[in-house]
Amino acid sequence: MRKITQSNLEAAFAGESQAHMKYLIFATQAEREYPNLARLYRAIAFAEQVHATNHFRVLGHIGSAAENAQTAIEGETFEVEEMYPAYYEVAKLQEEKNAQRTTNWALEAEKGHAVLYGSALESVKKGKDPAFGTIHVCMICGYTVDGEAPDECPVCRAKKDKFKAF
Ligand code: FE2
Ligand code: FE2
Ligand code: FE2
């Protein structure tokens, strides 16, 4: 692909991805008072996902199951080893308490994501679907665990009822 087209599609993918997430967050916010508005946000969030997927495919970023798991591991590992430690230190330096908390929570949760994708990759390499149980995610910090939710989230201390099951 020509270079400018490639960087344009990368930028479009990033923008569509952000719009998708933004609209889902807005939908959750609107849900109680404005259910039809919430529905519109969810519908358009899905449309943006379609756009993001189309660009992503044209960019050639969709691989085999093993390649995709490898890509996922690399993304999570980058966040754990470089991105969030650096962001956290800057937030600390600037005494931005809320940013310190959210970057630290994300950093801790991403460690688990990298591990889970690692075990998934091992399985996929053998052509087997990974044998996960119910996966639980802390709705407060994003800590993710395979199997039963803990009584207290090890990252943010939220109680068991704050875990969402997948
Ligand atoms: Fe779009
Ligand atoms: Fe993650
Ligand atoms: Fe948590």
Image (cartoon, rainbow, N blue to C red):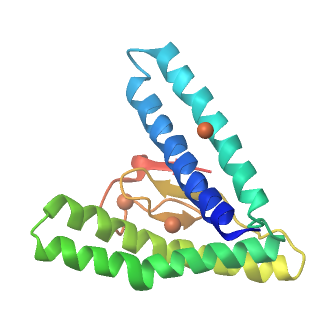
Asked if residue 26 is positioned above or below residue 21 in the image, the reply reads above
Q: How many marks?
A: 0
Q: Nearer the viewer, residue 164 or 82?
A: 82
Percent from the top left, x then y, of residue 78? Answer: 49, 81
Percent from the top left, x then y, of residue 2? Answer: 73, 68
Q: Is residue 89 left or right of residue 69?
A: left
Tell me the quadrant of ligand 3. Answer: bottom left
Image quarter of the N terminus: bottom right
Asked if residue 166 is positioned above or below residue 40 in the image, the reply reads below
Q: Residue at coordinates 66% horizontally, 34% vertically from top-left?
A: 47
Q: Quadrant of residue 104?
A: bottom left
Q: Quadrant of residue 66?
A: bottom right
Q: Nearer the viewer, residue 86 or 34?
A: 86
Q: Is residue 38 left or right of residue 10?
A: left
Q: Nearer the viewer, residue 61 or 96?
A: 61
Q: Residue furthest right?
A: 127
Q: Residue at coordinates 61% horizontally, 78% vertically from top-left?
A: 73
Percent from the top left, x then y, of residue 82? Answer: 40, 84
Q: Is residue 48 left or right of residue 164?
A: right
Asked if residue 66 is positioned above or below residue 17 in the image, the reply reads below
Q: Residue at coordinates 77% horizontally, 65% vertically from top-left?
A: 62
Q: Residue furthest left?
A: 95
